[in-house]
Image (spheres, helix red, strand yellow):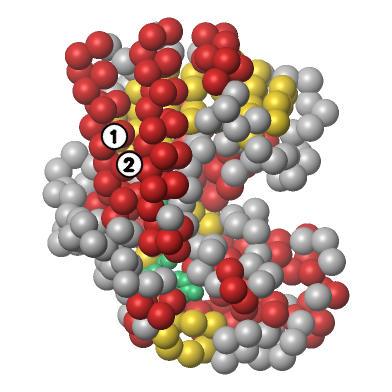
Amino acid sequence: MKILILGINGFIGNSLAARVLKDTNWEVYGMDIRDDKLDECHGAERFRFVEGDICINREWIEYHVKKCDVVLPLVAIATPSTYVREPLRVFDLDFEANLQIVRQCVKYGKRLIFPSTSEVYGMSPDKEFDEDESTLVLGPIRKQRWIYSASKQLLDRVIWAYGFQEGLKFTLIRPFNWIGPKLDDLTLQPEKEGSSRVVTQFISSLIHGSPIQLVDGGTQKRCFTYVDDGIDCLMKIIENAEGACNGQIFNIGNPNNESTIRDLAYKLREIFLSNPASRHCSGTPEIVEVSSGTFYGQGYQDMDRRVPSIKKAQEIIGWSPQVDLDTALKRTLDYYLDMHPGIKDR
Ligand code: UGA
């Protein structure tokens, strides 16, 4: 099998590519604007990488959609601060650029595995979010945080419609707060605060000795999923894309790893202080509160809870996540402390 991964240097892309090369005999073709997270892949015989931009290198993409069996367009802006600051950039990349690739999959009859998002459920009141039943609830237009969710939701609907009307073979995946090594680049400048997701934002504060900031008190909850668990599920979906997974949507999350953002901050700080490498960093950072208006801007709005139902993944492909929250946080923190070149000297 030949698989095409666009955005292969991203958090999900690089992990998936490494796993495919390790565990299968599939060929991997990848494009990204950078390749600094692909050390495990470079040099492998079945790996081809080209540096490029999905908005520019359209001919390369069309040629490779034609050539490959399965297409995973993983290029997207996925950080909430960008949804608020640059909503049009989110729409252009996450919706418009990806729609062209979806259409090429339709044109050439290729299997599409597309990343939807846990954000599509928005502020749904359901205790557990169900792929086929939950209502999707977004805030008013002036809260532009929802442009990401709305763009992804519309693409979900377009992909679904191509399946319904034109026979596109597809599977939609909805990752729920995946964490792990290589999640985001650490924020090194204070003016870029909020530019990565919560776990990397907190790790950055711990390493640089700046205060950890709890947005609106940190009572909101998320379910954190370790990347290896997520990739296990995605591999099963790729293997079954033609059969049981065709036309389906899967939440990929860990309902057992629910935590408030406040508890997450205290837990991470404790794990950090117990690591000998923390002695090289600047002291014990405080944990402070900040309003969402100050941290993100007025266009931000949040959901209090976000718990996936994973019944479907359990029943159809026999997948359940294995890694608990403490282990997931420890492995993520260890990576940034021990593996990131020069971090101990900063
Ligand atoms: C994320 C992003 O939209 C995407 O990465 C993705 O589609 C999705 O959720 C997912 O991974 O499932 P969110 O969970 O809100 O959205 O993103 P984070 O930036 O990780 O924030 C989590 C929570 O921590 C939010 O309530 C935020 O307000 C809070 N936070 C964030 C803080 O309290 N302090 C910070 O420094 C950063």
Q: Residue at x 54, y 50 (%)?
A: 227
For the N terminus, the image quarter is top right
Asked if one can make out residue 68 in the rendered structure from this viewpoint, the answer is no
SS state under label 1: helix
Q: CA distance from mark 2 to mark 1?
A: 6 Å
Q: Position of residue 57 (x, y in %)?
A: 60, 24
| Residue 198 in the figure: left or right of residue 166 | right
Q: Quadrant of ligand 1?
A: bottom left
| Residue 265 in the figure: left or right of residue 243 | right
SS state under label 2: helix
Q: Residue at x 23, y 32 (%)?
A: 157
Mark 1: C-beta under 8 Å from nearest atom of ligand 1: no
| Residues under numbered marks 2 and 1 in contact, where contact means CB atoms less than 8 Å apart | yes
Q: How many marks?
A: 2
**Depth check, front residue: 180 or 32:** 32
Q: Is residue 214 above or below residue 37?
A: below
Three-letter amino acid code at disc 2? Lys
Mark 2: few/some/many CA within 10 Å (<14, 14-19, 20+): many
Q: Residue at x 57, y 11 (%)?
A: 63
Q: Position of residue 151 (x, y in %)?
A: 31, 42
Q: Quadrant of residue 343?
A: bottom right
Three-letter amino acid code at disc 1? Asp
Residue 279's mark? none
Q: Position of residue 51 (x, y in %)?
A: 70, 31
Mark 2: C-beta under 8 Å from nearest atom of ligand 1: yes
Residue 152's mark? 2
Q: Which residue is mark 1?
A: 156
